[in-house]
Amino acid sequence: MATSPPPWRKAPPRTRAKVILTEAQKEEARERAEANGRRYPNLIDNMYVTRKAKADGTARVAGQQRSDEP
């Protein structure tokens, strides 16, 4: 059974929607990094928070207006 390469070795997708993390999500990534002994969040911490936001439906995609904006 072949395993997929780690995220940092994969080529980026040709098109994708960029997700903008809120301050709360950035803080969650920072806390996760600190809990794992790192000073700053890395790709995996950011991916975890982004995936969680997409599952919750709270992810903001770049270029889209927020529901509270006119």
Image (cartoon, helix red, strand yellow):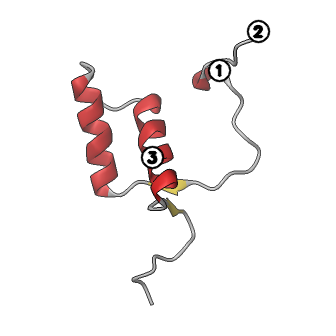
In 3D space, how far apart are the residues under numbered discs 2 and 3 (Cα atoms)? 28 Å
Type of residue at label 1?
Arg
Task: Please tell me in which quadrant of the rendered image residue 17 appears.
Answer: bottom right
Q: Is residue 27 visible?
A: yes
Q: Is 19 on the left-hand or right-hand side of 37?
A: right
Residue positioned 50% across, 52% down in the render: 55
Would you name the residue on which mark 3 appears? 52
Compared with 4, 26 (above or below) is below
In 3D space, how far apart are the residues under numbered discs 3 and 1 (Cα atoms)? 22 Å
Q: Earlier in the sequence, mark 2 or mark 3?
A: 2
Q: Earlier in the sequence, mark 1 or mark 2?
A: 2
Type of residue at label 3?
Lys
Q: Is 6 on the left-hand or right-hand side of 32?
A: right
Q: Position of residue 69 (x, y in %)?
A: 42, 84
Q: Secondary structure at mark 2?
A: loop
Would you name the residue on which mark 2 appears? 1
Q: Position of residue 56 (x, y in %)?
A: 45, 56
Residue positioned 28% across, 54% down in the render: 24
Q: Earlier in the sequence, mark 3 or mark 1?
A: 1
Compared with 21, 11 (above or below) is above
For the N terminus, the quadrant is top right
Q: Is residue 39 visible?
A: no
Extreme residue toward the bottom, this view: 70
In 3D space, how far apart are the residues under numbered discs 1 and 2 (Cα atoms)? 19 Å
Q: Position of residue 34 (x, y in %)?
A: 22, 27
Task: Please tell me in which quadrant of the rendered image residue 10 appears.
Answer: top right
Task: Please tell me in which quadrant of the rendered image residue 4 appears.
Answer: top right
Would you name the residue on which mark 1 appears? 9
Q: Secondary structure at mark 3?
A: helix
Q: Are marks 2 and 3 in contact (CB under 8 Å)?
A: no
